Image: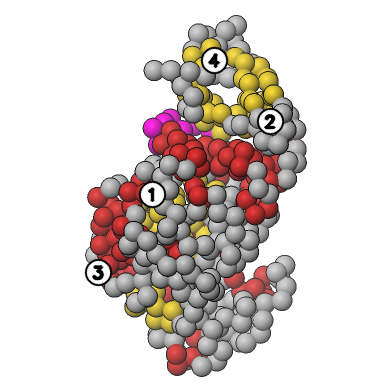
Amino acid sequence: MHKFTALLSLALILSVFIAGVNTATKEEWKKRTIYQLLTDRFSVGGPNGHECNNLSNYCGGTFNGIKSQLDYIQGMGFDAIWISPVVENTDGGYHGYWAKDIYKINPRFGTEDDLRSLVDECHKRDIWVMVDVVYNHVGPVDTDYNQIKDFNKPEHYHTKCQVTNFQDTGNMEYCRLSNLPDLNQNHPEVYKTLSDWTVWLVEKFNLDGLRIDTVAFVNREFWSALKKETLEGRLKDIYVVGEVFDGRSDFINQYGSIIGGVLNYPMYYTVQNVYGRSESMYQIRARMNEQDAVFSDAGALGTFIDNHDNNRFLNIQSDWKLFMNALTYTVFGRGIPIIYYGSEQLFNGAHDPFNRETLWNKFNTKSEMYQFISKLVKTRRNFIDNIASSKQVERYVNDKLYAFTRGQVFVATTNVGSFRDQRMEFDVTYHDYAEGTTLCNIFFENDCVQVQNNKFHIVLNYGESKVFVPRK
């Protein structure tokens, strides 16, 4: 493994001459709720858009399209967005993960001014912007590296071996994923270019955070160097959340402990099991206990139930009530919640590219799910100081029920689904509410319970979830 000592020294010297930038830290991001979108699929900018008949290529979404629908995003209470990579791509790179020139903005999405205008408008609304970035690979040019700006020499890349063993770290770090040319981050020119580009991107467009793609396919020495000298040093400890597509908590922590945050894929699989497949809710307890022992700060993990790499929840099963319960858990559970665009319109796409549907023509702010997500996210925001400073504490659990608190917010979920005429009842005796406290359901303000004799009674009908907050 190559050493980064000389590179770190160079980065330290360079950092002295870099202008300051106002970025957001991990602790600040814990108080945000993120709406994830793909620029090409979100909005074309007008009131109506064409149907896209080929989801494997560009459909037409733009930065200005996103800006035109910020009311739609803000109407659900979101105070952060994560957008797909913004750099110029090789042909067909609608998703942004096939870089051609990292210092150019993808003209299919707009101009530099358009991106900056989007960020400025977001900031006027107190919406933070996180941009997806890729350090592992470039676009599919085989070995014709002259097509790639800044990385145009064979020595900028690892050999042409293919990733075939996802349990072999060396194979993952030094071979090609899906035959995409694999950058050699240990090469001084590659390291410096990636570091300088990161600072340029964040400073030029005033970004608040970064989502990092394919983290486990890059060696940890690079991440340590980038974190220390670029993310912490030159960018004042900007928050990043990395993608480590793995269900093992100890494995993803190898990277999260370095860069600061990772997507919580282990909890994603647990949520899919208990809500999507109605397996025992005790799995949540087991996963929480496991992660308590593994992570030094599990609150910095990104939590989600849908994204662009996995089948949507409603594709795995079609019951809205189960989806609502999973969303309720995700918004109020430990971590930084991330909701994938289209969830509010009941999108149910399968694997890539069918989970990357176009949203234009479907901006229905009256839909039941839009209103439901809005209520969840706005409640989290209203109680965020209390929630962010409080642990997730289990209050009741059996195979079909999981209830917990975050500060003063009480959350009750079930996995029985709406297809069963089932009434779930239970007494909560383990809690921190004062005697006589009245708690009311955020979805139905007249549905209230009172703490009497140090307990209160919860009823869930037809697979519903409930969120209770103290009456003012």
| Tag 1: amino acid | Ile
Residue matched to label 1: 73
Q: Which residues are magenta?
A: 381-391
| Tag 3: amino acid | Asp
Residue matched to label 4: 449
Question: As rendered, which of 374 and 331 lies closer to the eye?
Answer: 374
Of the numbered discs 3 and 4, the one sitting upstream in the chain is: 3
Residue matched to label 3: 113
| Tag 2: amino acid | Leu
Residue at figure coordinates x 59%, y 70% from the top left: 217
From the top left corner, tell me how far across and down residue 301 is, in percent.
53, 49
Q: CA distance from mark 3 to mark 1?
A: 21 Å
Of the numbered discs 1 and 2, the one sitting upstream in the chain is: 1
From the top left corner, tell me how far across and down residue 265 is, in percent.
62, 54
| Element type where label 2 sits in the image | strand
Q: CA distance from mark 1 to mark 2?
A: 31 Å
Question: As rendered, which of 419 and 283 lies closer to the eye?
Answer: 419
Within 10 Å of disc 3 (Cα), the crowding (few <14, some 14-19, many 20+) is: few
Residue at figure coordinates x 45%, y 39% from the top left: 371
What number of labels is visible?
4
Of the numbered discs 3 and 1, the one sitting upstream in the chain is: 1
Where on the picture, by quarter, is residue 1? Answer: bottom right
Q: Which numbered disc, 1 or 2, marks the residue closer to the eye?
A: 1
Q: CA distance from mark 3 to mark 4?
A: 52 Å
Residue matched to label 2: 401
Q: CA distance from mark 1 to mark 4?
A: 32 Å
Mark 3 and mark 4 residues within 8 Å of each other at the beta carbon: no
